[in-house]
C-alpha cells in the first residue's frame, strides 16, 4: 500500500503536540490533585485550551485560511496536545460522585463557553482593527 504522506504536516502536528503535551504535563505536575479534590489543573487546561482554539480558528478563518501548516502546528499540534478531555473523563470516573458530576458539568459548560468567548473576542478585535484602517 502506497501512502502519500505530507511529511511537513506530520512534522508540524508532531512538533506542536510535543509542546502542548509538555505544557499540559508541567501544569498538572505543578498543581496535582487526589480523587477527593476537584481536578482544577485539568479543568483549567481544557477550558483555556478551548478559549485559545476559539481565538486561533477565528483568526485563521478571517486572515489566513490558506496557512494549513500554521493551523496544523498550533491547532492540531499544540492545542490538541495541550487539551486533555480523555484525562478529564478518566478523572470523572475516579472522582467522588458529587465531584464527578460537578466536574463533568463544569468541563462541558466551561469548554463551550470558552470556545465561544475566544471566538467572540477574536471577532471583536478583528472588527475594531479593520474599522481603524
Image (spheres, helix red, strand yellow):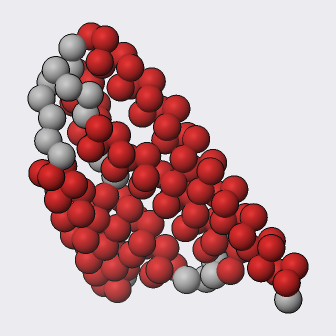
Q: Nearer the viewer, residue 37 or 66?
A: 37
Residue 34 to residue 2: above or below:
above
User: Residue, x 42% and y 72% (percent of image)?
Assistant: 74
Query: Going by the picture, which residue comes out furthest to the top?
Result: 97
- Give how far across and how far down residue 31 sits, in percent: 18, 46
Q: Nearer the viewer, residue 61 or 46?
A: 46
- Answer with left or right where residue 132 lies relative to residue 119: right
User: Residue, x 42% and y 33% (percent of image)?
Assistant: 107
Residue 11 to residue 125: above or below:
below
Q: Nearer the viewer, residue 38 or 1?
A: 38
User: Residue, x 36% and y 16% (percent of image)?
Assistant: 101
- Give how far across and how far down residue 85 sits, in percent: 33, 41
In this rendering, the count of numbered labels is 0
Q: Would you say residue 105 is visible in this rendering?
A: yes
User: Residue, x 21% and y 14% (percent of image)?
Assistant: 96
Quadrant the C terminus occupies: bottom right
Quarter of the image for residue 40 reads: top left
- Give how far across and how far down residue 58 sits, in percent: 64, 65
Q: Would you say residue 10 is visible in this rendering?
A: no
Quadrant the N terminus occupies: bottom left
- Answer with left or right where residue 57 lies relative to residue 33: right
- Give how far across and how far down residue 60 sits, in percent: 61, 74
Query: Going by the picture, which residue comes out furthest to the bottom?
Result: 133
- Answer with left or right where residue 112 lies relative to residue 86: right
Amino acid at each position: 500500500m502506497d501512502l502519500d504522506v505530507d511529511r511537513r504536516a506530520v512534522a508540524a502536528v508532531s512538533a506542536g503536540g510535543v509542546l502542548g503535551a509538555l505544557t499540559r504535563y508541567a501544569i498538572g505536575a505543578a498543581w496535582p490533585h487526589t480523587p477527593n479534590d476537584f481536578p482544577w489543573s485539568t479543568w483549567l487546561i481544557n477550558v483555556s485550551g478551548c478559549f485559545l482554539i476559539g481565538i486561533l480558528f477565528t483568526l485563521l478563518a478571517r486572515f489566513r485560511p490558506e496557512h494549513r501548516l500554521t493551523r496544523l502546528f498550533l491547532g492540531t499540534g499544540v492545542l490538541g496536545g495541550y487539551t486533555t478531555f480523555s484525562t478529564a473523563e478518566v478523572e470523572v470516573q475516579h472522582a467522588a460522585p458529587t465531584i464527578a458530576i460537578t466536574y463533568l458539568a463544569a468541563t462541558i459548560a466551561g469548554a463551550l463557553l470558552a470556545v465561544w468567548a475566544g471566538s467572540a473576542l477574536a471577532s471583536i478585535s478583528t472588527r475594531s482593527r479593520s474599522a481603524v484602517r
